[in-house]
Image (cartoon, coloured by chain):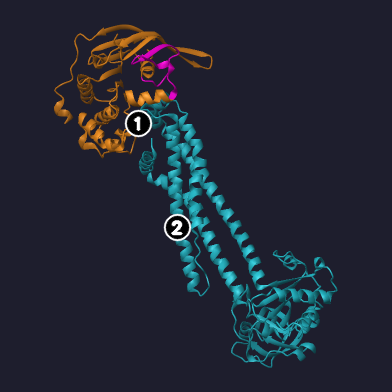
């Protein structure tokens, strides 16, 4: 029995019971479809996240407290507060000695419920430096941002994010009003322009106060959560990163780079780390989808075993008219593989269709979402579906080949 | 010396089921020449089916020799047995054993899957054998759509497609009404007239009398081997077939 005869034969058998063949395929269809969708939608989401990070400005350098591996996540993401990074360290960075650093801002954040009249919002208050608007390339739409003098004098002034302003004051002009944050009165001196979501964080529902005020009046801490430094160009950020490291080592009296109690990352490094993290999440999800494939494979094995039972007489007949044991094996194996391969192809088509729909929907909502469908992943999906058929087809095929033709012919 | 098509010498077969030994054949010897039409006749349990299975390469004897075209079948491997079944033997079963929900054409070409006959020739062969049994108009029907007699004729067509040296018919009329049974016997007689060797297994005297020679078997032994004196000819049914 050659290849084309095997194909011919498999299609006769599969066509004989179309509904059952389809239901048998379903496990593989769903499994392959999930893998394709997760790979593709995952890649799309990754592109969205990375695009957002890029949109935050690639000439930014981030400083986090705590040492970290070169490309691993910083220690502070694990939730333990690290108290080594100070506002003073950041202020020292802007100096005529290294003109590539244009501006630097400290960040110290907390959460509180802020009220105005009947309106209440849960919001982040963010202590930042006066140079925040330079660092993040933003500006106020109303009023003004606070000044370095106000920062130094721990002034109780606040600049609202555009959404916070709207939620609290509606159409009313918030300028000049007093709000209470952590039971301390702050006067509103400005409202930020609308910025949208950037880097996982909605920038518009925050309240900006001088970092000194956040530390001393609101949080009772003397450290900062992180800092951002703006440099003149995004290319060759390496020397700036090195300058910042040395400056911080000098402030912290560290001789050996091994003992660093901070980590400094350029946006490129951040992208790299984020790429790694999102890749890991994608792989994890693909692994879960692969379980569906295994379950589908077991389902197919079960159905093929039942089919061998049901087709005992047919197998007896095939043996009587000259089929050798290995031809029976290859016939059943080929049938199983045909089913899983067809299922795989249908799964790929559905998966690509769903991924394209998701991408179009996301694009129509204004996200920078790329439709990523890699040819290798489709090729791999085909191979996997054939492999599943092979692995789960062996047992039923061997059982069929082992039948005694006379017993099989008598079987009713 | 001219060789017989098939020859068995002191053929024995016993079945073991745990510690119980059931003898089925107790030493059977005979020859069948090319072109014969032999009926193996006996009551149920006589061993006639076992004999047919051994002659049809489906089973091996416990002892004794079986020569097919002068070759000792005992020396055949399992694959050689399968190959011989495919090339030299056509089976016709009482229960037809057609694949359900599969067209007659696909049913009939089934034995070709296991040969190296080129695919170009398949359709030609199928049409030829279907014409021989008068079913050329039923090509695309499935077994569920045709009568019992037509099913058995389709099974005969399947048995013929590899132009076998010998055709085994195991109670071919057992599941048929007498009219359809006669049609089937008529086809078998015609095939024999055209030179096909046919071995018929039956327990009915009337059916057996359509052959030319009757081997009677009882308790695993041949009790008589004689030519049919007053042969039944299934004729006058030509109109019924077409």
* Secondary structure at numbered mark 2: helix
Q: Position of residue A324 (x, y in %)?
A: 42, 29
Q: Which residue is mark 2?
A: A350
Q: Can you say whether A222 is above or below A343 in the image?
A: below
Q: Position of residue B76 (x, y in %)?
A: 42, 20
Relative to A168, is B235 on the left or the right?
left
For chain B, give the colour.
Answer: orange
Quick check: marks 1 and 2 in contact, CB under 8 Å?
no
Image quadrant for the C terminus of chain A? top left
Q: Can you say whether A204 is above or below A173 in the image?
A: above
Q: Nearer the viewer, mark 1 or mark 2?
A: 1
Count of numbered marks: 2
Please tell me how crowded label 2 is: few (under 14), some (14-19), or many (20+) other residues with Cα within 10 Å.
some
Q: Chain of mark 1?
A: B
Q: Position of residue B242 (x, y in %)?
A: 16, 31
Q: Which residue is mark 1?
A: B115
Residues beneath discs 1 and 2 located on the same chain: no
Q: Position of residue B81 (x, y in %)?
A: 40, 23
Relative to A357, is B38 on the left or the right?
left
Relative to A44, is A403 on the left or the right?
left
Q: Can you say whether B4 is above or below B105 in the image?
A: above
Specify the segment rendered in magenta: B56-78
For chain A, give the colour.
Answer: cyan
Q: Residue at point 36% right, 32% down?
A: B114
Q: Can you say whether A355 is above or below A177 in the image?
A: above
Query: Is B234 included in the stretch rendered in magenta?
Result: no
């Amino acid at each position: 029995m050659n290849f084309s005869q095997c194909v011919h034969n498999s299609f006769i058998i599969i066509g004989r019971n179309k509904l059952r063949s389809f239901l048998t395929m379903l496990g593989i269809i769903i499994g392959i479809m999930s893998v394709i969708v997760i790979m593709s939608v995952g890649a799309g989401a990754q592109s969205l996240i990375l695009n957002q990070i890029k949109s935050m400005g690639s000439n930014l350098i981030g400083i986090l407290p705590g040492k970290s591996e070169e490309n691993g996540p910083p220690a502070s993401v694990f939730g333990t507060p690290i108290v080594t990074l100070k506002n003073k360290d950041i202020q020292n960075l802007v100096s005529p000695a290294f003109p590539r650093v244009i501006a630097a801002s400290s960040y110290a954040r907390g959460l509180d419920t802020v009220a105005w009249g009947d309106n209440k919002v849960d919001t982040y208050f963010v202590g930042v430096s006066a140079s925040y608007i330079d660092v993040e390339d933003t500006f106020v739409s109303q009023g003004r941002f606070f000044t370095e003098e106000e920062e130094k004098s721990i002034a109780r002034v606040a600049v609202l994010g555009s959404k916070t302003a709207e939620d609290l004051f509606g159409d009313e002009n918030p300028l000049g009003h007093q709000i209470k944050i952590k039971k301390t009165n702050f006067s509103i001196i400005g409202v930020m322009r609308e910025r949208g979501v950037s880097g996982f964080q909605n920038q518009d529902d925050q309240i900006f106060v001088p970092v000194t005020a956040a530390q001393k009046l609101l949080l009772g801490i003397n450290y900062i959560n992180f800092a951002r430094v703006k440099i003149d160009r995004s290319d060759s950020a390496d020397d700036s990163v090195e300058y910042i490291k040395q400056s911080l080592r000098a402030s912290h009296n560290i001789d050996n780079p091994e003992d660093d109690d901070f980590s400094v990352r350029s946006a490129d490094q951040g992208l790299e780390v984020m790429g790694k993290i999102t890749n890991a999440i994608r792989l994890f999800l693909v692994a879960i989808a692969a379980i569906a494939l295994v379950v589908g494979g077991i389902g197919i094995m079960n159905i093929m075993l039942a089919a061998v039972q049901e087709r005992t007489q047919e197998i007896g007949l095939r043996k009587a008219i000259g089929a050798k044991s290995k031809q029976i094996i290859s016939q059943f194996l080929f049938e199983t593989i045909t089913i899983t391969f067809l299922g795989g192809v249908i799964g790929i088509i559905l998966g690509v269709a769903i991924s394209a729909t998701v991408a179009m929907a996301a694009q129509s909502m204004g996200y920078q979402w790329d439709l990523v469908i890699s040819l290798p992943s489709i090729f791999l999906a085909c191979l996997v579906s054939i492999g599943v058929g092979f692995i789960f087809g062996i047992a039923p095929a061997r059982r069929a080949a082992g039948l005694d033709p006379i017993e099989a012919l008598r079987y009713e | 010396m001219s060789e017989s098509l098939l020859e068995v010498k002191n053929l024995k077969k016993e079945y073991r089921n745990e510690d119980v030994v059931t003898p089925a054949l107790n030493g059977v010897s005979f020859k069948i020449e090319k072109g014969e039409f032999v009926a193996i006749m006996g009551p149920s349990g006589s061993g006639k089916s076992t004999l047919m299975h051994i002659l049809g390469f489906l089973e091996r004897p416990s002892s004794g020799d079986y020569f097919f075209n002068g070759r000792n079948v005992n020396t055949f491997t399992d694959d050689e047995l399968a190959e011989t079944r495919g090339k030299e033997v056509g089976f016709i079963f009482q229960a037809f054993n057609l694949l359900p929900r599969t067209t007659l054409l696909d049913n009939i070409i089934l034995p070709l899957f296991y040969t190296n006959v080129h695919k170009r020739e398949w359709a030609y062969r199928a049409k030829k054998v279907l014409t021989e049994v008068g079913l050329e108009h039923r090509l695309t029907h499935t077994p569920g759509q045709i009568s019992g007699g037509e099913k058995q004729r389709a099974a005969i067509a399947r048995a013929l497609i590899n132009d076998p040296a010998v055709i085994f018919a195991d109670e071919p009329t057992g599941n048929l009404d007498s009219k359809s049974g006669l049609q089937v016997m008529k086809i078998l007689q015609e095939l024999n007239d055209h030179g096909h060797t046919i071995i018929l297994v039956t327990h009915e005297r009337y059916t057996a009398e359509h052959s030319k020679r009757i081997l009677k078997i009882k308790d695993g032994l041949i009790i008589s081997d004689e030519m049919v004196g007053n042969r039944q000819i299934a004729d006058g049914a030509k109109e019924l077939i077409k």
